Image (cartoon, grey):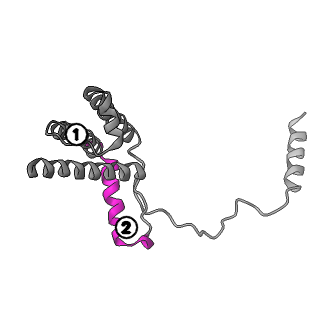
């Protein structure tokens, strides 16, 4: 095919196009983004308290050090719970948690290994998935419950 023929075919193809010219400038309805980097949006309709709560959760999620402290506190509180449980058992008290009571029937060492092992595995999973808000919320809930259990043990040890 000669260059004249190529030009003629190209002109015929251009003439057969239908529809509007996409190169023409349209009215712009999109406004440029005013955020910088990877800033996250907060929906203004959620309210101030919810927005503050989400910022606190995000502060933990975005900081590896804060996430590590949270996950380590879960493990440490489980270790303290187990130590206080053994102290209470030495005083003649009984375990109220039926799962741990069943583990204690097999032996103190095995019960401690399972309880601390589960805490370490869950803390490692929490560390791995710390970018998800629900994981941080669950970890905070577990830490709060375990702190309550440790306080309960402390009050029980000093009361007896």
The picture places residue 65, in percent across and down from the top left corner, at: 25, 43
* Mark positioned earlier in the residue sequence (1 or 2): 2
Q: Which mark is residue 142?
A: none
Relative depth, front residue between 143 and 10:
143
What secondary structure do most residues of the magenta stretch adopt?
helix
Instruction: Give the number of the mark in front: 1 or 2.
Output: 1
Q: Which residues are magenta?
A: 44-65
Which type of secondary structure does the marked residue at label 2 adopt? helix
The picture places residue 29, in percent across and down from the top left corner, at: 59, 70
Magenta region includes residue 117: no
The picture places residue 8, in percent across and down from the top left corner, at: 89, 46
Relative depth, front residue between 147 and 140:
147
Residue appearing at x 47%, y 62% in the figure: 33
Mark 1, Cα crowd under 10 Å, few <14 / some 14-19 / many 20+, is: some
Q: Is residue 126 left or right of residue 11?
A: left
The picture places residue 5, in percent across and down from the top left corner, at: 91, 40
Mark 2, Cα crowd under 10 Å, few <14 / some 14-19 / many 20+, is: some
Q: Which mark is residue 76?
A: 1
Q: Which mark is residue 50?
A: 2
Q: Is 111 located above or below residue 47 in the figure?
A: above
Tags 1 and 2 touching, CB below 8 Å: no
Residue appearing at x 31%, y 31% in the figure: 105
Quadrant of the image containing the N terminus: top right
Q: Is 104 located above or below residue 145 in the figure?
A: above
Residue appearing at x 23%, y 50% in the figure: 147
Relative depth, front residue between 139 and 150:
150
The quarter holding residue 30 reads bottom right
Q: Is 27 located above or below residue 58 in the figure?
A: below
Gap between marks 1 and 2 measured at Cα: 30 Å
């Amino acid at each position: 095919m000669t260059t004249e023929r190529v030009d003629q075919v190209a002109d015929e193809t251009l003439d057969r196009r239908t529809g509007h010219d996409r190169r023409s400038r349209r009215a712009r309805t999109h406004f440029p983004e005013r955020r910088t980097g990877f800033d996250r949006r907060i929906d203004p309709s959620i309210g101030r308290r919810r927005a503050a709560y989400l910022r606190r959760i995000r502060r933990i999620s975005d900081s590896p050090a804060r996430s590590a402290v949270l996950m380590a506190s879960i493990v440490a509180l489980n270790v303290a719970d187990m130590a206080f449980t053994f102290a209470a058992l030495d005083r003649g008290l009984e375990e109220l948690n039926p799962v741990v009571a069943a583990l204690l029937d097999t032996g103190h060492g095995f019960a401690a290994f399972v309880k601390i092992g589960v805490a370490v595995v869950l803390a490692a999973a929490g560390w791995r998935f710390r970018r998800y808000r629900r994981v941080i919320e669950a970890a905070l809930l577990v830490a709060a419950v375990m702190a309550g259990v440790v306080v309960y043990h402390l009050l029980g040890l000093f009361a007896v």
